């Protein structure tokens, strides 16, 4: 079992033991931890090195020119779409991608809290 699955299952057991008021308080704290929605980006950063093909260029014997970064975004039934990420945008792009993953984790936990409250027939 992966760490995430173990942590997730452990978190579910904690949710089931917490009083409703504590769940609502925890949910409110999670909402405050969400990053700003304008600072979210879905996808993955891909690092690439390219060879230019010029005779005598150092890239012919080395790893290539780079690193160059690309944002890869997948959609169901389509090939991943790749967009070049300029070097000066790399840090912000990486931050926005991390915000997306953190937001998903927080939203999943909020959903589980709401589900537990609903299961107990408590006010959401």
Image (cartoon, rainbow, N blue to C red):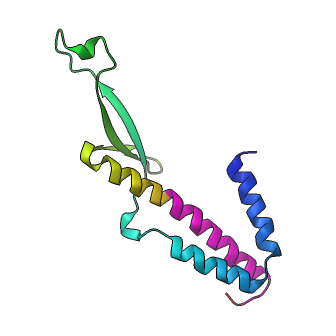
Query: Magenta segment: does it hold 121?
Result: yes
Image quarter (top left, top right, bottom left or bottom right) of the C terminus? bottom right
Quadrant where the image shows the N terminus:
top right
Q: Compared to 25, does 94 lie above or below?
A: above
The residue sitting at 36% across, 68% down in the picture is: 38
> Seen in the image, is 25 located left or right of residue 119?
left
Task: Identify the main secondary structure in magenta.
Answer: helix
Position of residue 54 relative to residue 120, above or below, is: above
State how many labels appear: 0
Q: Quadrant of residue 9?
A: bottom right
- Residue 82 rendering spot, x and y as whole percentages: 33, 43
Q: Residue at x 39, y 38 (%)?
A: 46
| Residue 24 can be seen in this image | yes
Residue 45 lies in quadrant: top left
Q: Residue furthest bottom?
A: 123
Q: Is residue 12 left or right of residue 64?
A: right
Up-down: is 41 above or below 63? below
User: Does residue 79 appear in the picture of this structure?
Assistant: no
Residue 116 on image: x %, y %: 75, 77
Q: Position of residue 44 (x, y in %)?
A: 43, 46
- At a point 44% along the width and 51% down the height, the residue shown is 75
Q: Pinpoint residue 52: horizontal percent, then vertical percent.
A: 21, 21
Query: In the shown orientation, is residue 123 left or right of residue 72?
Result: right
């Amino acid at each position: 079992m992966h760490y995430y699955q173990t942590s997730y299952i452990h978190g579910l057991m904690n949710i089931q033991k917490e009083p409703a008021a504590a769940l609502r308080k925890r949910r409110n704290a999670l909402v405050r931890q969400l990053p700003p929605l304008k600072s979210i980006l879905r996808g993955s950063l891909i690092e690439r090195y390219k060879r230019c093909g010029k005779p005598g260029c150092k890239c012919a014997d080395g790893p290539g020119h780079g690193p160059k970064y690309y944002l890869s975004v997948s959609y169901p039934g389509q090939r991943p779409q790749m967009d070049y990420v300029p070097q000066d945008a790399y840090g912000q792009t990486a931050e926005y991608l991390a915000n997306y993953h953190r937001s998903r984790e927080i939203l999943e936990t909020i959903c589980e809290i709401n589900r537990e409250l609903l299961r107990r027939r408590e006010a959401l």
